[in-house]
Image: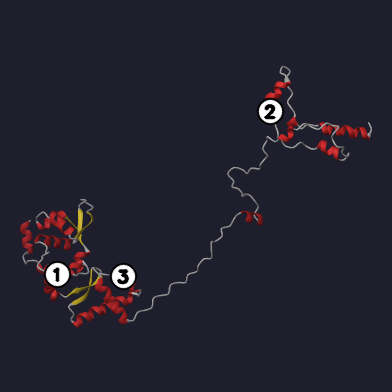
Amino acid sequence: MSDEERRDSLADQAAAWVPPWERRPTPAPDSPAEDLGDELPLQGPKSAMIPAQPAATAPAESPDQVPSAVDAPPPAPADEPAAVPTEPAGEPAGQGEPAGEGAAAAVPRKQAAGRRRVTAAPEPAPELGDAELRGALEAILLVVDEPVSELALAEVLEQPAERVGPMLDEIAAGYTAAGHGFELRRAAGGWRLYTRPEYATYVERFVLDGQSARLTQAALETLAVIAYKQPVTRSRISAIRGVNCDGVIRTLVSRGLVEECGTEPDSGAFLYRTTTMFLEKLGLNSVADLPPLAPFLPDDVEELADATR
């Protein structure tokens, strides 16, 4: 076969070649080809449905290009999805890449919204002079409705507590030396202004104005037992007084002079103690400032105790 005849034969084969995905399946022997062609739709894109050009109309190709067209692998079928590389399950995207500039560029870095503001440390409050510190303490003590501690005063004035304590002692000594009708006294763990006892008659006349808010004798006795025996149970108070004191204790609790402070481990009974209002009303700093009971006891207290046994 000559070279010209071989070239014409290869050109005819290239023009008549049909890709596999465009070829119709061979019909079974017992079924007509027309029916099989109607039932099976053609696969592939619309361009694949265009019939091949006849060999006569195919342009002549050079011998170097014809073998490449015949031997080229057919493209992937249109109905099959392209292969997508997948990552192993359980491994996040980007993991396993070598560390370097590429890996660093793949991981986005959090960028700050703006530069951090550098705030300077607060400047310490200027130290007050003695006269100004005295006036500030007196102004605060005139408006408090309960004893205020030295630490609270130091925080409000932004001054060291080592200065506030001695200044309060100096103010209290100055009031006493000047003979004022009021005094600065430490009570219930704090400081507060009180009227002097020698002017109590005039103060009561002005405040009460004919109204009496005194405690009954039973309430005073019960309050005294709680003050000296605290914490104490109701049964113990009743045993000391010799009468039931449940109603009296409720009255003292409602007035804020007595409060519950837990239960007794053995019996589970409620324990009672005095409150800070009790100390404030009596002008005491703690229950340790209560007067001793020995001077108020009768001389024959031991004989009376033996008689009651």
Q: Is residue 3 left or right of residue 229?
A: right
Measured as percent of width and height from the top left, residue 10 is found at 87, 33
Tell me how far mark 3 sits from mark 2, CA to CA: 93 Å
The picture quadrant where one finds residue 250 is bottom left
Q: Nearer the viewer, residue 213 or 302?
A: 213
| Number of the front mark, 3 or 1 | 1
Tell me how far mark 2 sits from mark 1, CA to CA: 110 Å
Numbered circle sitting on residue 152: 3
Residue at left offset 20%, top offset 56%:
271
Pick whichever of labels 3 and 1 is earlier in the sequence: 3
Numbered circle sitting on residue 57: none
Q: Residues within 10 Å of mark 2 (few under 14, many from 20)?
A: few
Mark 1 lies on residue: 207
Measured as percent of width and height from the top left, residue 107 is found at 60, 54
Mark 2 lies on residue: 41
Kind of residue indicated by mark 3: Ala
